[in-house]
Image (spheres, coloured by chain):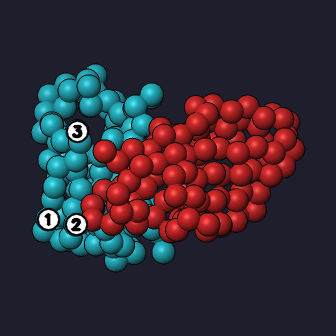
Amino acid sequence: NAGVTQTPKFRVLKTGQSMTLLCAQDMNHEYMYWYRQDPGMGLRLIHYSVGEGTTAKGEVPDGYNVSRLKKQNFLLGLESAAPSQTSVYFCASSYSRGNEQFFGPGTRLTVL
Amino acid sequence: EDQVTQSPEALRLQEGESSSLNCSYTVSGLRGLFWYRQDPGKGPEFLFTLYSAGEEKEKERLKATLTKKESFLHITAPKPEDSATYLCAVGHSSASKIIFGSGTRLSIRP
């Protein structure tokens, strides 16, 4: 039982490049979330999903897109990376609305 | 407006020196209050869920308690390996998101 896994662990991009971060969970959770964490800013919600085929915006969605084609996977895309998107990205999942979330190990992204 | 405030921002203790971290919250329709531990460079690790005032949960040297307005994370006789950032969060009964506090950085000196 791996819990929540994230791929890749580290990535360096140049401004304007695109990439996709993959999150997978094996707990059969309905809800999945993408956060970014920056020094002094805490965890900020980017996008989330309440079930397969659904997505919704969080508090900082601009510059990101997401897809939830399978229940166990939640993808975060950056179409044209900017230096302001340098951050650590965490994926999380939960069983249902308002319940505790379980986090992945994170992806450290640097945009030059 | 739903809000979570943690204090202090940072706490430095000597090994064996017990203390408490505070999490104050305002939320209409509390689903649960959650405590997490986060080590540098890692994702938050789930510790406890508290559902109603008066509830207590324990794990090793940690004990979490809940009132109608705040939660405390008591740490008894801490060891250097307890050094981490501790995050508090609340879940709303009618919202998909949970609200995180900014965390308390705990440092235990040997």
Circles 1 and 2: CB atoms closer than 8 Å: yes
Q: Earlier in the sequence, mark 1 or mark 3?
A: 1
- Across and down, in percent, residue B69 comes to 51, 52
Query: Is the C terminus of chain A in the top left, top right, bottom left or bottom right quadrant?
Result: top left
Q: Are marks 1 and 3 on the same chain?
A: yes
SS under mark 1: loop
Q: Position of residue A101 (x, y in %)?
A: 41, 61
Q: Name the foreground residue: A25 vs B36.
A: B36
* Colour chain B appears in: red
Does any portion of residue B33 appear in the rendered image?
Answer: yes
Q: Is residue A17 left or right of residue A97?
A: left
Q: Rounded to the nearest whole Å, what is the CA distance between mark 1 and mark 3? A: 18 Å
- Using the image, name the chain to which the residue with label 2 belongs: A
Q: Badge 3 sits on which subunit?
A: A
- Up/down of A16 relative to A101, above or below: above
Asked whether residue B87 is in view, the answer is no
Which of the labelled discs sits on residue A60, or is there none?
3
- Amino acid carrying label 2: it is Val
Q: Residues within 10 Å of mark 3 (few under 14, many from 20)?
A: few
Which residue sits at x=32%, y=30%?
A86
Q: Which chain is cyan?
A: A
Residue for point 74% across, 50% down = B75
> Along the polypeptide, which appears first: circle 2 or circle 3?
2
Where residue A83 sits in the image (x, y, percent)? 26, 24
Extreme-front residue of the structure: B68
Disc 1 residue type? Answer: Thr
Check disc 2 and report its element: helix, strand or loop: loop
**Which labelled disc corresponds to residue A50?**
2
